[in-house]
């Protein structure tokens, strides 16, 4: 199997879906001639032309609103929001419109739309190029939120998102784009939205995570193995809807759970996962559920010292796992 | 009414009579809804009263077999012309399962009907204006020649989405007709406090496409303006902005009391220009509407509204368990 980068998996999924289905088109700021500021749409303009690889005006609400109209009409738009931080002007279109179109029309209309957005820090992006925005949308019924961590998951889940009949927010950790590489099959495949994946089997402590911090957790698990601590790692992959069965099973496996995400602690996905475990797997637990998350400060600062303080890393996660293991 | 003559616009006597019938039907449905609301039978009404000429005039200039609507909550006249019925409106007013817009989920006036290419709408204003641009763009990808008419009030035309939509459609020369139904009030706030410069249509110049202002109490003037916009759109010449000026004859909604912000004298003065009255006189003057045919028309509409009301009142509510239908995440 060829080894490709996380961002190449995005590009491949887009290219193959556009080739497979003439209804698919991409739109966003700088996605055309430039191929995207991260180059996620590189080569698509040359292959599919300016109409299916549309450079839009600098208007996030329009990118999403126009996509909604096209999706309702019968197209399969894939909208790119250049940085997840800039999705805020489009929240009304996403939450009031895309998420509610099937429901409010009693199934008469659908909105098969994918919104891709690079998120996350560790790239010297400061306050407005580093945010994790998932908790803004988590808990909005009518949205699916996919947050893959590996190239294999990116490609299979992005294809699934494009083929989905309903709106999907597809958040790509921008630090993963060129950092994370992995094997991806050449043949066409999709992965089910709403299914978590065990990325490492272990017996002592369960770590539940997604995105970049999933890789940090795997590195921490590697370090701790030498100390005799066996870590089980569950990758949520989709945070809405949550794979409840997989979460309960992973919690029960070790009885000690650490939830890790880069998004802020308060209101983050971790709270929901912890509540689910408390409700459904209380008697399987040997320790209180722990959360290790981005701090509750307004955003990630620019200065490297403060950025490092905000970001999680394998050491911070290893420390949290050790504490749980010793409980 | 101005000197516009329907025959010069290519409209037959039958067609203008049909226009009047739709205007009157919209008005009578609306009036019935207020009665039902005041009788405690339906929770809410949002009105088309005063804007029927805009809605019916515009819809008649479109192709009802291929063009699209992204309307707003007052466009009762428009959706009737496109195919919805009095019964549909009453099912919606009573929030019954058979409501074609939403199966009783949405408030009245939140139109949406795939049968007639009326896109489902919401309450936050002008979100639908961007959807219209998306439908127009999708049509271009398909090589289709439909146009999309989207409407909103003059207050709503201040929203960012409205600007983004005009700009996007202007850049890509898309066949969108931006209809602003200027009824002079956004709930209680008058035009002067809503629109800088007082004229929405002039904004079109900045977007690089034509803007026109028409008398929204004259369905023929609206028809003419929309007809021209449709032709431009189909020829690939891009969008048109139309500001149709009329007046909201009733409070914003059944929960509003307009006596707190406008005088009765003002409302009475505007009622003299009510399009239903003015167009009726035009048809009478041209011998298209006689005393006899008018009586017949009024009677048949009353019967239609009565039957629709009775049907909808007796119709089944949605099953409570339908709350969980169409849920996927």
Image (spheres, coloured by chain):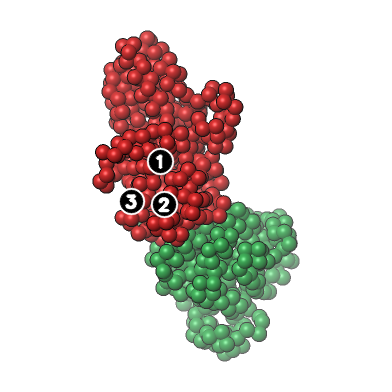
Q: Are marks 1 and 3 on the same chain?
A: yes
Q: Which chain is green?
A: B
Looking at the image, which residue is at 54% across and 66% down?
A: B173
Q: Earlier in the sequence, mark 2 or mark 1?
A: 1
**How many marks can you see?**
3
Q: Residues within 10 Å of mark 2 (few under 14, many from 20)?
A: some
| Number of the label disc, if any, that sits on residue A43 | 2
* Spot occupied by residue B304 in the image (x, y as percentages of width and height): 45, 72
Q: Quadrant of the N terminus of chain B?
A: bottom right
Q: Chain of mark 2?
A: A
* Spot occupied by residue B309 in the image (x, y as percentages of width and height): 45, 64
Q: Earlier in the sequence, mark 1 or mark 3?
A: 1
Q: Earlier in the sequence, mark 2 or mark 3?
A: 3
Q: CA gap, disc 2 to disc 1?
A: 13 Å
Is residue B64 something one can see in this rendering? yes
Looking at the image, which residue is at 54% across and 39% down?
A: A85
Q: Chain of mark 1?
A: A
Front in this rendered view, residue B192 or B43: B192
* Spot occupied by residue A35 in the image (x, y as percentages of width and height): 46, 50
Residue wearing tag 1: A7
* Spot occupied by residue A65 in the image (x, y as percentages of width and height): 50, 54
Q: Chain of mark 3?
A: A
Q: Are marks 2 and 1 on the same chain?
A: yes
Q: Are marks 2 and 3 on the same chain?
A: yes
Residues under numbered marks 2 and 3 in contact, where contact means CB atoms less than 8 Å apart: no
Please identify the quarter of the rendering in which residue A209 is found: top left
Residue wearing tag 3: A16
| Number of the label disc, if any, that sits on residue A60 | none
Looking at the image, which residue is at 36% across and 34% down?
A: A181
């Amino acid at each position: 199997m060829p080894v490709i980068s996380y961002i190449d998996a995005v590009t491949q999924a887009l290219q193959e879906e556009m080739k497979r289905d003439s209804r698919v088109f991409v739109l966003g700021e700088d996605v055309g001639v430039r191929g995207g500021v991260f180059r996620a749409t590189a080569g698509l303009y040359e292959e599919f032309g300016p109409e299916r690889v549309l450079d839009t005006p600098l208007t996030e609400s329009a990118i999403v609103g126009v996509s909604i109209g096209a999706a309702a009409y019968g197209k399969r738009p894939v909208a790119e929001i250049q940085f997840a931080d800039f999705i805020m002007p489009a929240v009304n279109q996403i939450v009031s419109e895309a998420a509610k179109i099937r429901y409010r029309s009693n199934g008469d209309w659908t909105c098969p739309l994918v919104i891709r957005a690079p998120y996350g820090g560790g790239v010297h992006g400061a306050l407005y190029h580093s945010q994790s925005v998932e908790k803004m949308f988590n808990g909005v019924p009518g949205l699916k939120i996919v947050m893959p961590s590996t190239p294999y998951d990116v490609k299979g889940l992005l294809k699934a998102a494009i083929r989905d009949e309903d709106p999907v927010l597809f958040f790509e950790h921008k630090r993963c784009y060129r950092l994370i590489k992995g094997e991806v099959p050449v043949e066409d495949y999709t992965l089910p939205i709403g299914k978590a994946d065990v990325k490492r089997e272990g017996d002592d402590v369960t770590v539940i995570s997604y995105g970049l911090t999933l890789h940090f957790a795997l590195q921490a698990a590697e370090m701790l193995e030498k100390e005799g601590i066996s870590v089980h790692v569950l990758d949520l992959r989709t945070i809405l809807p949550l794979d409840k069965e997989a979460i309960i099973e992973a919690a029960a496996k070790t009885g000690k759970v650490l939830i890790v995400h880069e998004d802020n602690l308060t209101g983050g996905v971790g709270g929901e996962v912890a509540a689910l475990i408390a409700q459904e797997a209380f008697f399987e637990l040997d320790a209180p559920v722990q959360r290790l998350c981005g701090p509750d400060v307004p955003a990630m600062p620019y200065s490297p010292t403060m950025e490092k303080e905000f970001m999680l890393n394998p050491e911070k996660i290893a420390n949290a796992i050790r504490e749980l293991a010793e409980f | 009414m101005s000197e516009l003559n329907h025959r010069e616009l290519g409209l037959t006597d039958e067609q203008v009579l049909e226009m009047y019938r739709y205007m009157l039907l919209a008005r009578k449905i609306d009036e019935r809804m207020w009665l039902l609301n005041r009788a405690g039978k339906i929770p809410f009404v949002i009105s088309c009263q005063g804007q029927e000429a805009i809605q019916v005039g515009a819809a008649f200039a479109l192709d009802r077999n291929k063009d699209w609507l992204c309307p707003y909550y007052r466009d009762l006249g428009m959706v009737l012309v496109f195919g919805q019925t009095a019964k549909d409106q009453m099912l919606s007013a009573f929030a019954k399962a058979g409501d074609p817009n939403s199966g009783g989920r949405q408030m009245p006036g939140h139109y949406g009907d795939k049968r007639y290419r009326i896109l489902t709408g919401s309450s936050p204003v002008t979100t639908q204006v961007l959807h219209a641009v998306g439908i127009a763009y999708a049509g271009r990808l398909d090589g289709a020649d439909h146009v999309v008419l989207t409407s909103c009030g003059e207050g709503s035309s201040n929203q960012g989405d409205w600007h983004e939509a005009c700009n996007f459609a202007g850049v890509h020369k898309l066949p969108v007709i931006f209809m602003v139904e200027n009824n002079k009030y956004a709930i209680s706030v008058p035009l002067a406090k809503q629109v800088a410069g007082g004229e929405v249509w002039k904004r079109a110049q900045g977007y690089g496409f034509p803007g026109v202002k028409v008398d929204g109490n004259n369905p023929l003037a609206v028809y003419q303006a929309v007809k021209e916009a449709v032709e431009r759109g189909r020829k690939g010449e891009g969008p048109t902005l139309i500001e149709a000026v009329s007046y909201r004859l009733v409070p914003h909604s059944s929960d509003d009391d307009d006596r707190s912000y406008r005088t009765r004298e003002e409302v009475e003065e505007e009622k003299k220009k009510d399009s239903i009255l003015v167009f009726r006189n035009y048809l009478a003057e041209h011998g298209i509407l006689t005393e006899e045919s008018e009586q017949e028309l009024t009677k048949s509409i009353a019967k239609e509204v009565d039957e629709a009301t009775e049907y909808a009142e007796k119709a089944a509510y949605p099953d409570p368990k339908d709350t969980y239908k169409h849920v996927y995440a």
